[in-house]
Amino acid sequence: MIQRFRNSRIGFAFFGVMILICFFPLNSFSKFQQVQKGNYKTLNDSVFAVDDLIRTPAILFDLGRCELKTDSSFDAVDSLKPVTLFLKKFPNLVVEFGCHTDYVDPSSSQRLTYCRARSCYEALLKLGVDSARLSFNGYGASAPFVLQNDIILPSGKVAPKGMILNGEMLDRKFPPRWKNPDNAFLRSLDRRTELKILKTDFKQ
């Protein structure tokens, strides 16, 4: 009877699921499939809801470091000033400042993005943002970006709207990782900083 069960379609499906669970615990699936919820907005929009996401202007950091990039000709703090103006324009909003990176080095990316988010948080406080309206988090590569529109890639190919920029997808569709300009371009989109709307009814 056991042999017949194994030979049936149900038996194969059952054993397949058991093998997957043994090799990939359930929490590992949620880790790789976590995708940011909420609609994407811009700093120029005027209506916001909880969980909406706003991609900020590019913020530069020194390679592998937490500090905002600053030298004699450039100060990354300037990239945060539009965020400050936005929060002054909408004093009812409470937001989370989040940093994300691509999937290339997950062992260190969580710690690095958290550290960078904290640097941005501290810079925003110095620019006058109320700490009661601001928090921060580093997501590493756990929340890959979802393309909001079709994107024309360096090769001329089109990456479709809705594509999730995780390692499995990019390495399968655009190999090899280190030599394919399409892969590099999409990974650059995944490296980002975002505001997430936490509350829309803040009152001092």
Image: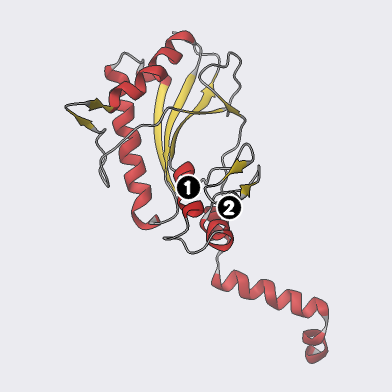
Callout 2 amino acid: Gln
Task: Say which quarter of the image contains residue 126.
Answer: top left
Secondary structure beneath label 2: helix
Q: Which residue is located at x 40 percent, y 56 percent?
A: 106
Task: Say which quarter of the image contains residue 65.
Answer: top left
Residue 199 spot, x, y in % from top left: 53, 21
Q: Is residue 182 visible in this depiction of the protein?
A: yes
Q: Is residue 152 left or right of residue 122?
A: right
Work out whether 79 lies above or below 63.
above
Q: Of label 2 and label 1, which has the lower sequence position?
A: 2
Q: Is residue 203 visible in this depiction of the protein?
A: no
Callout 1 amino acid: Phe
Q: Residue furthest left?
A: 72
- Dot 1: few (<14), some (14–19), or many (≥20) neighbours within 10 Å? few
Residue 135 spot, x, y in % from top left: 40, 28
- The residue wearing badge 2 is 33
Residue 23 spot, x, y in % from top left: 55, 72
Identify which residue, 196 or 6, lies in the foreground: 196
Check the picture and name the quadrant holding the N terminus. bottom right
Work out whether 19 lies above or below 26.
below
Q: Is residue 178 left or right of residue 69?
A: right
- Dot 2: few (<14), some (14–19), or many (≥20) neighbours within 10 Å? few
Check the picture and name the quadrant holding the C terminus. top left
Please give the label number shown on residue 185: 1
Secondary structure beneath label 1: helix
Task: Say which quarter of the image contains residue 123.
Answer: top left
Q: Which residue is located at x 33 percent, y 53 percent?
A: 108
Measure the alpha-carbon separation of dots 2 and 1. 21 Å
